[in-house]
């Protein structure tokens, strides 16, 4: 039963969060059956789990280098972005430069301001990523989009990546 909770309908492994949610719901349903005397014990209680069974672990977040552009390719892409329009080009360069050089998510770059950056003259400085801007399409949600906190990170994932000299040269738009 636990193995069935650990996979999606298409047979691919489910995320640890999905597995945890499914197990929690099933555990509560089986607990109700125990209270109504339909079962003697809850098979999903920790002492009743099969010997040696371990829950799915978080996926390894290593980056496939084939999916990431080389520094030369990114530099060429940033040069090409700089030629788009009069005002859009520098914004695109800053946006994509922050994503590549500072490893920021698009929502974090959209909420980034010059005041949130600590950029020393030499070396690397971390941007302040405590805010991110969410923008939903019209009609998808009734809540108004607005600033949100940082995305939850895993235990070994750091939030702030230092922004180096290439990202400092791009710089965010002043806001």
Image (cartoon, rainbow, N blue to C red):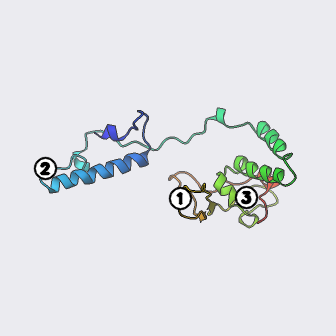
* Residue 108 position in % (x across, y down): 65, 57
Name the residue: 83% across, 50% down.
Answer: 89
- The alpha-carbon separation of the residues under discs 2 and 3 comes to 61 Å
Between label 3 and label 1, give the one nearer the viewer: 1
Residue 73: which quarter of the image? top right
The answer to whether residue 6 is above or below residue 164 is above
Front-most of residues 127 and 37: 37
Callout count: 3
Whether residues under marks 2 and 1 lie with C-beta atoms below 8 angstroms apart, the answer is no
Q: Residues within 10 Å of mark 1 (few under 14, many from 20)?
A: few
In the rendered structure, the answer to whether residue 21 lies left or right of residue 101 reads: left
Name the residue: 53% across, 51% down.
Answer: 156
* Residue 37 position in % (x across, y down): 12, 53
Name the residue: 69% across, 57% down.
Answer: 110
For residue 57, the mark is none
Residue labelled with disc 3: 125
- The alpha-carbon separation of the residues under discs 3 and 1 comes to 36 Å
Residue labelled with disc 2: 38
- Give the position of the N terminus as an image quadrant: top left
Secondary-structure class at tag 3: loop
Name the residue: 81% across, 57% down.
Answer: 122
Front-most of residues 117 and 32: 32
Secondary-structure class at tag 2: loop
Secondary-structure class at tag 1: loop
- First in residue order: circle 3 vs circle 1: 3
The answer to whether residue 111 is above or below residue 12 is below
- First in residue order: circle 2 vs circle 1: 2
Between label 2 and label 3, give the one nearer the viewer: 2
Residue 115: which quarter of the image? bottom right
- Give the position of the C terminus as an image quadrant: bottom right
In the rendered structure, the answer to whether residue 78 lies left or right of residue 51 reads: right
Residue labelled with disc 1: 141
């Amino acid at each position: 039963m636990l193995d069935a909770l650990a996979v999606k309908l298409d047979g691919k492994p489910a995320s640890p969060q999905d597995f945890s949610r499914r197990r929690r719901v099933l555990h509560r349903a089986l607990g109700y059956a125990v209270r109504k005397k339909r079962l003697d014990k809850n098979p999903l209680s920790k002492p009743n789990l099969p010997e040696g069974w371990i829950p799915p672990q978080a996926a390894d977040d290593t980056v496939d280098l084939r999916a990431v552009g080389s520094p030369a390719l990114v530099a060429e892409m940033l040069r090409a972005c700089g030629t788009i329009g009069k005002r859009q080009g520098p914004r695109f360069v800053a946006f994509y430069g922050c994503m590549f050089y500072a490893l920021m998510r698009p929502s974090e770059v959209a909420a980034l301001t010059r005041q949130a950056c600590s950029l020393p003259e030499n070396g690397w400085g971390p941007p302040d990523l405590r805010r991110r801007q969410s923008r939903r399409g019209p009609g998808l949600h009734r809540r108004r989009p607005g600033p949100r906190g940082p995305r939850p990170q895993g235990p070994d994932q750091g939030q702030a990546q230092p922004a180096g000299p290439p990202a400092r040269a791009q710089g965010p738009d002043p806001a």
